[in-house]
Amino acid sequence: YRFCPIMIENLPKLREEIKDVSMSDLKDFLESIRKHSDRIGETAMKQALQQKTFNIALHKQTGMNYKKSACVANGTVPEDDHRGSEQAADEDGEPEEEVLTVQDLVDFSPVYRCLHIYSVLGDKETFENYYRKQRRKQARLVLQPQSNMYETVEGYRKYFSQIVGFFVVEDHILHVTQGLVTRVFTDELWNMALAKIIAVLRTHSSYCTDPDLVLELKNLIVVFADTVQGYGFLVNRLFDLLFEIRDQYNETLLKKWAGLFREIFEADNYSPIPIANEEELRTVISKFPFQDSELVKQTFPKKLPMSQSVPQIYMQVKEFIYASLKFSESLHRSSTEIDDMLRKSTNLLLTRTLSGCLQNLMKKPHIGLTELVQIIINTTHLEQACKYLEDFITNITNISPETVHTTRLYGLSTFKDARHAAEGEIYTKLNQKIDEFIQLADYDWTMPEPDGRASGYLMDLINFLRSTFQVFTHLPGKVAQTACMSACKHLSTSLMQMLLDSELKQISMGAIQQFNLDVIQCELFASSEPVPGFQGDTLQLAFIDLRQLLDLFMVWDWSTYLADYGQPTSKYLRVNPSTALILLEKMKDTSKKNNIFAQFRKNDRDKQKLIETVVKQLRSLVNGMSQHT
């Protein structure tokens, strides 16, 4: 027949035209699912979250752990879950939301048609290779994030939706076609995608400084992982990544709480909390576990020893624990692991953030001695409250602190270190204040006679010390005693340095006597027990070097000094020969000019010669000491 050659000639052309048309439809399909993959993924993630929420609620109510729904994996929700959903909807009195399937969102007919045509025409392998190649390209495009994705949670949500949408389509193709894609192919795509996803999230999450955004990202990752896991993909590495992001979350929390702590410390008045009535007392105790049976017995109004920052800091530490706990939810971790996470993050808050804020606070110029005393009292109460924080975590996790390997809170050491630092600042600021008074000293070092009364600057200094040590009554005894001893020693050293100053060339006996009146006032202050707890004349011994030196010069008892030098029973045991020599040289120069030793020469005209002799003997002692050294 004549039409046979025509058919033989035209059929291959028709076949190619049919293949071209079907391939064109396929390309349109691929472009369409690329544009709509985020909606597909969003629907799948939403259904996965709803199913998970339902399962949790049902598990709590009945103790039954319903199996996870495959969501849109096979186009339907399992039959048991449909019944459960219907029951839940009936109980709530709300109509069940229509469950969309992947077929509702995407028309797969171009794929089926093209696959069928290529199969019939014996070119199925060509079609499979083309489809897989195009989907690999689309996978790489889907995995590319926007540059500013880390700025908002919506950026992350769109990113995850696109990826889920891509794999929902591949899973559907896997189940409804034979051989177009295989499990090996989808697993290969997923492993490539997973590596890229982890790298992207690791980079973008590191830019985030808002803990709320990091927490939302974590929740998105959990929903994303649960969704793709429902399609049979392995997600262990995603949960491992969440532990890295948890550290990032804790860092952002620590920065946020550092700001909160600074605000609390800045707003504090560093005065005991006034309590006017029972209601105010209950309000404070509801925020902070304060216990003092003696204070409770006192009548209103009364004062709590700590300042207002203490209950505020305690409440913020509890809020931090709650915030840290939020990240641990849905991570499929045991109570023991969650307990360990909470304790470690709380330890970081105490030992690094709060400790750092306290250290910086104490260095601020507006923090004076009164504020430092209050800080010591505050840290004492916060230290005592640490056991209640332990109990607080235990109540959350139901893990006893006595359990083996349980991390203990380091609050005790944190507040002890802060207290020691505050004590050191007290000693430093006291000495600085003493130096300020010393700078006001204005001695006439050539005065022939003393004024008959102590210098004004010194009396002001002693009055300041007396009022300051009255504030120390709330401090632990040893702290107050150490501060008092430190102040007296520093005062004694400063007065001695004043006498021995190389800029001071001449000192008269009248100036020595005036200086002695000032030292007597220091000794009287020390003997008045400005801080209780000192035994005997312990505090007065701070001025013993000055006392023995002044006595030696005022009594002019050189024979005794030189005779008993080096003996443990010496009356002037604390007088160093070099110190005596420096002061005697200053007085020798004065005697030559002002004839200050005239009265001695009346009684003993060889007095000047005696001074020379004493100077030589003192130099001999000093030289002997240096050679011995």
Image (cartoon, grey):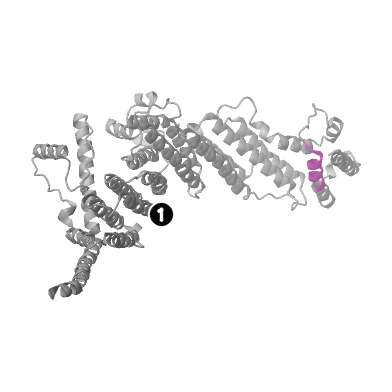
- Where is residue 184? Give x, y as percent: 34, 50
Q: Is residue 1 left or right of residue 176?
A: left
Q: Is residue 433 visible?
A: yes
From the image, give the main secondary structure of the stretch colored magenta: helix
The answer to whether residue 261 is visible is no
Residue placed at 18% from the left, 57% from the top?
106
The segment highlighted magenta reads 575-585
User: Which percent across, then down, holds residue 163?
Assistant: 29, 55
Q: Residue at x 8, y 38 (%)?
A: 90
> Depth check: 432 or 174 in front?
174
Which amino acid type is shown beneath numbered disc 1? Ala
Q: Quadrant of the N terminus?
A: bottom left
Circle 1 sits on which residue?
Answer: 199
Q: Is residue 567 left or right of residue 409?
A: right
Measured as percent of width and height from the top left, residue 341 is found at 40, 37
Closest to the observer, 122 or 315:
122
Quadrant of the snapshot with the C terminus = top right
